[in-house]
Each structure stands twice: as structure tokens, then as C-alpha cells.
Image (cartoon, helix red, strand yellow):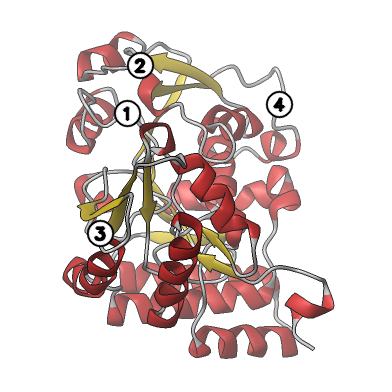
Amino acid sequence: MDSYKKFNLKDVINASGKMTILGVSKVSESVLAAQRFGGEHFFEMSQLSIQTGSYLAKILHVEDAQVVSSASAGIAQSIAALIGQGSAYHAYHPYTDKVTRREIILPKGHNVDYGTPVEVMVEQGGGQIIEAGYANMCTPENVETMITKQTAAILYIKSHHTVQKSMLNVAEAVAVAQKHKLPLIIDAAAEADLFKYTKAGADLVIYSGAKAIEGPSAGLVIGKKEYIDWLRLQGKGIGRSMKIGKDNILGFTQAVDDYVKNGSESGNSMKARLTPFIERLNQLSNLEAKIVQDGAGRDIYRASIKVTGEKTAKEVIQELKAESPAIYTREYQANNGIIEFDIRSVSETEMNKIVTRLTEIIN
């Protein structure tokens, strides 16, 4: 009996993208094999952490790396690390009054809710968010204005969730951080390029293990060795409640290995797979379909469908979820009558099922 039947669960077609609410992504046979090896053997866990970090650092061309339980854990532990600066006392007492340098500067348009607010993870790490700029604008000067003696770091969120217009770019954030001798953390959870941000000058960069990399539940923090050493120390404090198992450490390390060697699906491949899908959708009444690029400029292409007629986009979305398989889409523009379909984790068979379901719903 499979788990859908055993636990009375719906089958799911994930056309929403690499979303945490759906388990993010699928893993390969090589990753499953590495996880199984981890599950069947014992390790000196401190050495497993250090040695897998060293291995990943070599293939990613950085000073050091640390596998953590999630990108969110990476944010919290990175903040704690840069506040504590290697203090064992702080690791055991992360919210102690003996440490007062806790301000973390973040562009206001980056203080978003990605499933939980960014500020929750910063505060969990003991940081105090200081917003720079405005909801629709943040310049390098806006960030500099907020720097004080209590500033511990600058945090930059690279995500489609953030405001995209009139925001300082990564190079400008690096320049401000270096000018004021402050560490810069970049949360690049869903980004596909594992080299770009450390090459640009970021001190710590955080990735989700299960999104672009398509590994098991995990996160990755890469960057300066001193800061990674401080981050590992958080295992004695807040990191204890965020620890990751040996199977996922090995599975994720294998996923990074595979990803660096093989890459991910290209935008051109996505467009080629989308073309017949779009053509079929445009044959349905009350639907206008086209291919669009990811709003944050990533090499990701999706089907965008304008819903007209008696049913609203929100009603169509709910009906897509109602049956089994439940079809999940991107709902960010539903108020504008638009539904997006991300096909990165969708097979041709599943795309046929989506067309069939939409035909039933529209008719």
C-alpha cells in the first residue's frame, strides 16, 4: 500500500513550483541511495558535518560550507553566529544582555513573508530588524543611513517574493557592507546559481536544499570560514532544535554534487515543453494562455492563464485542488484573474491531466 492510500491522502500535481507546502521537490535515485547509506550507518556527527562542509566548499569554490536543516534555519543560525562572533557563552545564552550589537539592516521591501516572515527568523537568531528605505524603494544611501555601532550585519533577500523595482542590487549591497566593514548575508533560498553571490562578495550565502538543488529537506550556508565556524557553534544553542539527520546530510551533499555536474532544466527546455500545453489550453473557451518568464528574472518559464467568463480565477483554483489528484498552481495573481502553472516538477502525463481537469471545470 502506498502512502496516499495508507494515510488517506490526495495525490498531488505540483504546478506551483518548488513550494514548501507541497514538500518542495522530488529527489533522484542517487540522492535516495546516499540517504539510505546514511540511514544504515553510524558516523561521528561532528566530523560528518565538517567533512561534508569541506567537500562542498571545494566544489563550490568557497572557504567553507555547512549543511543545516533548512534555509530558514540558515538565516537564524547565521544571524546568531554574527552576533555571537565565536563566543561559547553566547552560544549557550543567545539572547543574553551581555551582547548588545544585534541590529540587522534589511531593505524594507525585503521584509517579506515567504511562509513565515523574514523578521521571525532574524529574531529567532537574536537579531533586531532595522528596516532601510521604503516599501517601494531602497538605495545604498538608505542602507548606510541606518548603520550604527550596534549593527551586526546587513541582510539581503534575493527572492521573487521581494519588491523588485527601485531596490539596491547585490553589488551595491556588497559595496556598502565592505565600506563599513560589516558582514553581508544573502538569503538566496530558491536561487539556482551556487557561485554567483559569493563571487560577488557576499560573506554568507544561504540556499534551500530542496528547491533548485532538488535535494532532501536541508539548507546550505556557504562563505567565509570564520563565519561558518561561528555558525557551527550554534549547534550548542539554537541550532540544537534545528539539527539535521545523517541521512539528509549525505543525501543533500549528493544532490549538490549532481547539481553542479548536471545543472537543472533550462529555460529553453521549459518553453519547449510549455508550447503544446499552451496551444491546448488556448483551445478552451474563457482561457487565454501564454508563456511568461519568472518575475524575478530567473531562467524559469511558466504558463500564464487569464480566466474570463462566469467563473473567477479563484474559483478555478479551488476546483483544481478539490479532486485527487489535487492540482496546485501559483496563485499570486488570482485577484487579477490570472493563474500560473510552473511545470518544472510536472510530467507530460500530469500536464495532460491538468488540461483534462480544466476542460471539465470550464465546461
Vertical arrangement, residue 193 with respect to residue 120, above or below: below
Q: Pick whichever of labels 3 and 4 is earlier in the sequence.
A: 4
Look at mark 3 in the image and give the residue it sits on.
Answer: 301
Residue 211: x and y in percent read: 45, 61
Q: Quadrant of residue 323?
A: bottom right
Q: Are marks 2 and 3 in contact (CB under 8 Å)?
A: no
Tell me the element at label 3.
strand
Label of residue 95 in the image? 4
Task: Identify which amino acid the numbered label 2 is placed on.
Answer: Ala
Question: Which one is in front in this view, the residue at disc 4 or the one at disc 1?
Answer: 1
Q: Residue at x 43, y 82 (%)?
A: 349
Q: Residue at x 58, y 86 (%)?
A: 32
Tell me the element at label 4.
loop
Q: Are marks 4 and 1 in contact (CB under 8 Å)?
A: no
Look at mark 1 in the image and give the residue it sits on.
Answer: 163
Look at mark 2 in the image and give the residue it sits on.
Answer: 135
Residue 185: x and y in percent read: 39, 39
Tell me the element at label 1.
loop
